[in-house]
Image: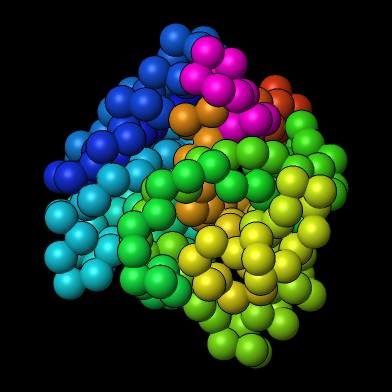
């Protein structure tokens, strides 16, 4: 597979994503600067975490207008696989590729710690190497990870199986105690209706090697690779 890691001014997880894709998982990967306008021959786009444009105005609000984002939107609308991690999730919300918005964490503090996630849908390009109900341990690091959505849209997400990850206890119980930031319905990650765009607040790229304390995040990337091997990932060639 050919991967593109988008780099915005202020990105700080781009090198992590590049490293695990190229050096750990043996993938063909390149960086794309935010002013680039070409995603031809790319199979999967990664919007990494960080503080794009210093998170001025609100997280992801300025990055949404970077030239590359027009191409990312076209890429996604044509069926290309897109994963947004943390700030990348925030950018996807601002770009309208995913529904909802991000608020400040419920305690108004930056949170950096390991959390548990329950797999709610294992039949996507991002989770096909997992099992429904499986619990993953993946770190978060954000100040604006409180995912908010109105009741009508939340019902739609639930009905369409678009909720991919929920914060849970180590035993897999979804409860307010396990919700680190106040997110609606304990949501840690969602996808679009076509299931080709994923946004998640936790950082799977930080737990791909056991030497770093765990490798649960590897399952997310291996699922995407598996989708490519099965032929369900399609390269988008832009004119």
Is 217 part of what is drawn in magenta? yes
Residue sitting at x 59%, y 32%: 217
Residue at the spot 22% in from the left edge and 52% down from the top edge: 52
Asked whether 60 or 209 is in front, the reply is: 209
Q: 182 or 94, which lies in front?
A: 182
Asked if residue 158 is among those painted magenta in the image, a careful observer would answer no
Task: Residue 130: name its quadrant.
Answer: top right
Q: Is residue 31 above or below residue 232?
A: above
Quarter of the picture holding the C terminus: top left
Residue drawn at x 72%, y 67% is 175
In this rendering, position of residue 153 left or right of residue 54:
right
Question: Could you tell whether 111 is left or right of 230 in the image?
Answer: left
**Residue 70 spot, x, y in % from top left:** 30, 57
Residue 99 visible in the picture: no
132 horizontally vs 230: left or right: right
Q: Position of residue 230 (x, y in %)?
A: 75, 28
Q: Which residues are magenta?
A: 209-221
Residue in the foreground of this view, choosing between 174 and 29: 174
> If the image is split into quadrants, where does the N terminus sit?
top right
Q: Which residue lies most toward the right here?
A: 132
Please indicate whether residue 204 sits to the left or right of residue 186 in the image: left
**Residue 51 shows up from this direction:** yes
């Amino acid at each position: 597979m050919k991967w593109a890691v988008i780099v915005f001014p202020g990105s700080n997880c781009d090198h992590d994503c590049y490293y695990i894709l190229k050096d750990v998982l043996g993938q063909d990967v390149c960086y794309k600067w935010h002013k680039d306008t070409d995603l031809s021959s790319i199979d999967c786009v990664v919007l990494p975490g960080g503080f794009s444009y210093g998170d001025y105005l609100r997280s992801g609000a300025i990055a949404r207008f970077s030239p590359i984002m027009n191409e990312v939107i076209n890429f996604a609308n044509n069926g290309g696989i897109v994963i947004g991690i943390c700030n990348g999730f925030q950018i996807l919300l601002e770009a309208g590729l995913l529904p909802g918005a991000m608020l400040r964490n419920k305690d108004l503090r930056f949170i950096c710690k390991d959390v548990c996630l329950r797999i709610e849908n294992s039949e996507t390009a991002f989770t096909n190497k997992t099992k429904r109900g499986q619990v993953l341990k993946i770190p978060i690091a954000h100040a604006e990870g409180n995912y908010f959505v109105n009741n009508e849209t939340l019902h739609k997400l639930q009905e369409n199986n678009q909720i991919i990850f929920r914060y849970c206890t180590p035993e897999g119980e979804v409860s307010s105690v396990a919700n680190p930031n106040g997110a609606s319905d304990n949501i840690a990650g969602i996808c679009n209706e076509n299931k080709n765009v994923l946004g998640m607040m936790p950082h799977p790229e930080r737990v791909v090697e056991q030497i770093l304390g765990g490798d649960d995040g590897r399952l997310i990337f291996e699922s995407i690779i598996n989708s490519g091997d099965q032929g369900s990932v399609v390269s988008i060639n832009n004119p």
